[in-house]
Amino acid sequence: MTILPHLHRLRSWFLLRPRFWGILLLVLLAVRIVLPLGIRDAINDRLAKVEGYSGEVKDVDLQLFRGAYRLNEVSVLKHEDSGDEPFFSAETVHFSIAWGELMKGRLVSDIFLVAPRMQITRTGAPVDPSEEGRRWQDVIEDIFPIEITHLEVSRGEIRFVDPAATPRVDISLHDLHVAATGLRNTSTPESGPFPAVLNAQGNTIGNGRLNLFGQGDPLADQPRFQIKLDLQDVDLTALNAFLEAYANVDVSAGRFQVYLEVNAADGLFEGYVKPFADQVEFKNLSDKSKGPLSRIWESIVSGVSSVLENEDREQVATRIPFSGKFGDPKVGVWATIVNLVGHGFGRGLPEGLDDEPTPTQETPPSTKDADTK
């Protein structure tokens, strides 16, 4: 029995019913128009239910055949006693199916953020960061139910603002580029203990250059990660508002750099910070507009800085070790003082990262040597 007569009748049925095709095209067009609006409204409704915040997505683009969609002009405001403050915004947030992972039987997504901006505003009201973190985690899981395994950020910005400080503090990290991979991967013999990798670069006010490298196991029961950071060539005069507000000093010249390394395993962590201040000159020590206590304090800071400065480098520096359990940190105060004096009067501390070995589950970091290192 041949199927050709049946195929012929089926072909004739479709050709004789142009209305069918017209209706089908109209239905598909209607779905294509209405679906993005429905998704946009659903996202905006969810953002409106976040306590203490309000948000909006202007537009949603769907690319069904690519398994992708894009949120355009995203903005979230945080409600403060003094009024609404910007919290997060982005030109676009683009999601697409990670086809390589789909071939392995995993439905995960890549996410690309263009010009995201996050502002952290300091207020006098007490804040529970863990509670806010859980709240936003729930929102993200509701809006983006697909697991994210790859993240990229271009032209990002992180801003810290303290409107109550005198003077007002407003510092930022801008031109931020971030690439994070393996965010939902587990540790395997092939990947080693750190299946996820993070690389970030950016610029600060004062033309500083930030480099950050991190790797870890996001799905581990106990935190297990390694972070290395260096920030170089910051013009200290650009930080005068910050220095005056929190340290009651200001400078007329100087450059700043800092190096940080943190290793964690089995609920313990260990690391250090090495700050360097080069050719610092304090500003207006005899400024009559300042109170007498402020002038005395700045003179003390200037004098101590001069005494502890390494003459060959015209530089003040120290190494601050820290370690402990999460929630119970210990800072090596004595070691910090010894390193500060040693840099000024002896051989200067080496600039750059120390590149200490990363702890593993078999060799967790120690918490008992914080003050002796």
Image (tube, grey):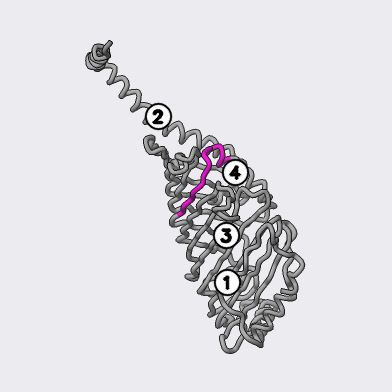
Q: What quarter of the picture does the C terminus occupy?
A: bottom right
The residue to which callout 3 is attached is 161
Q: Is 70 situated left or right of 271 in this image? A: left
Q: Residues within 10 Å of mark 2 (few under 14, many from 20)?
A: few
Gap in angstroms between the C-alphas marked 4 and 2: 28 Å
Q: Residues within 10 Å of mark 4 (few under 14, many from 20)?
A: few
- The disc labelled 1 sits on which kind of residue? Leu
- Whether the residues at callouts 4 and 3 have beta carbons within 8 Å, the answer is no
Circle 4: element type: helix
- The disc labelled 3 sits on which kind of residue? Val
Would you identify the image quadrant in which residue 278 lies?
bottom right
Circle 1: element type: loop
Q: Residues within 10 Å of mark 3 (few under 14, many from 20)?
A: some
Residue 353 circle label:
1
Q: Closer to the camera: disc 2 or disc 1?
A: 1
Q: 200 or 358, which is in the foreground?
A: 358
Q: Residue furthest right?
A: 368
Circle 3: element type: strand
Residue 69, placed above or below residue 178: above
* Residue pictured at 56% horizontal, 66% vertical: 229
- Whether the residues at callouts 2 and 1 have beta carbons within 8 Å, the answer is no
Magenta residues, start to end: 139-153
Residue 34 circle label:
2
Q: Is 310 situated left or right of 72 in this image? A: right
* Residue pictured at 56% horizontal, 74% vertical: 352
The residue to which callout 4 is attached is 137
